[in-house]
Amino acid sequence: MEQHRRPRIDLTAEGYAAIYALSDIHGCYDELIEAERRIVEDAGTIPGRKLLMFLGDYVDRGPRSNEVLQHLCEPPPVGFDRYILCGNHDDVFLKFLDDPRANSHWLEFGAVQTLTSYGVDAEYLLLEEGRSIEELCETVRQAVPRAHVELLRSLPIAIVIGPILFVHAGIRPGIPLAEQTDQDLIWIRDPFLSEGPQLPMLVVHGHTPGMRPVFGNHRIGIDTAAAMGGSLTVLKIADGQQTILTQIF
């Protein structure tokens, strides 16, 4: 049994006129700002409440993780509610800050770019003779604002809105959400990718990168490899339809 489970939230009763989802920003701050600009422009034509749904992985790989997290600490655009889900990279970053020796694998997980964005030269510090992983982590703790750590610690792991589940990676097929572990929800690929949820729901997720969005078996994958030469995809859900609003390259 997991010692700590992140929140799972049901927003079915909220009645949003439009939902905009994006995932796997990975430090691509400029693309995030442009995506939000296009979302706000599109939402201006739609009366009613709107929702911004972020599906995780805000840090690592890309150049500006610091600025992405700072942006997510600030209020959402006027007229929007916003939920920020946890991704596996966000989870491992936080675990490194809490217990660096047990989670030192984060340093080979796209972390160097994250640390550089906070002004920490991790490669130099690791090569410096006699420096321990704990000493490096203490340098990182001093560089990362408390608000960023509190944000990472607060992130829920799944959002349900009627027949749609928003989650970072997916679910174990056929298993009710209440029985899914946090590990399942932020790390799974197969058998979810090949089998779909095997439940009466549509799963909107990121985590598995590709050059284009995937409309699969009761799932929509929107990780389009923003930090690996791809794009940042915005999925729009309105009037019972799921469409790609835009891809920012």
Image (cartoon, grey):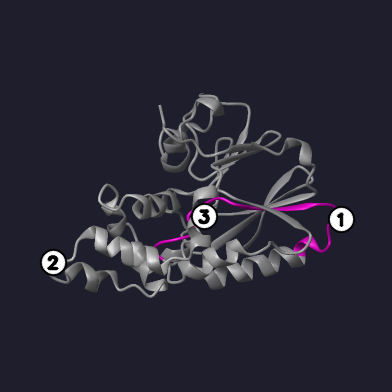
* 49 in magenta: yes
Q: Which of marks 2 and 3 is nearer the N terminus?
A: 2
Q: Position of residue 111 (x, y in %)?
A: 34, 62
Instruction: Give the residue pinned by disc 3.
Output: 150
> Residue drawn at (58%, 26%), measured in percent from left and top?
199
Q: Which numbered mark, 3 or 1, is in the foreground of this view?
A: 3
The image quadrant where one finds the N terminus is: top left
Considering the whole magenta stretch, tell me its main secondary structure: loop
* 2 in magenta: no
Q: What residue type is labelled 1?
A: Pro
* Measured Cα–Cα span from mark 3 to mark 1: 33 Å
**Front residue (pair 42, 119):** 119
Instruction: Give the residue pinned by disc 2.
Output: 130
Marks 2/1 in contact by CB < 8 Å: the verdict is: no
Secondary structure beneath disc 3? helix
Marks 3/1 in contact by CB < 8 Å: the verdict is: no
> Residue drawn at (52%, 70%), measured in percent from left and top?
67
Which residues lie in the magenta part? 42-61
Instruction: Give the residue pinned by disc 1.
Output: 47
**Front residue (pair 80, 95):** 95
* Measured Cα–Cα span from mark 2 to mark 1: 61 Å
Q: Which amino acid does label 3 sit on?
A: Glu
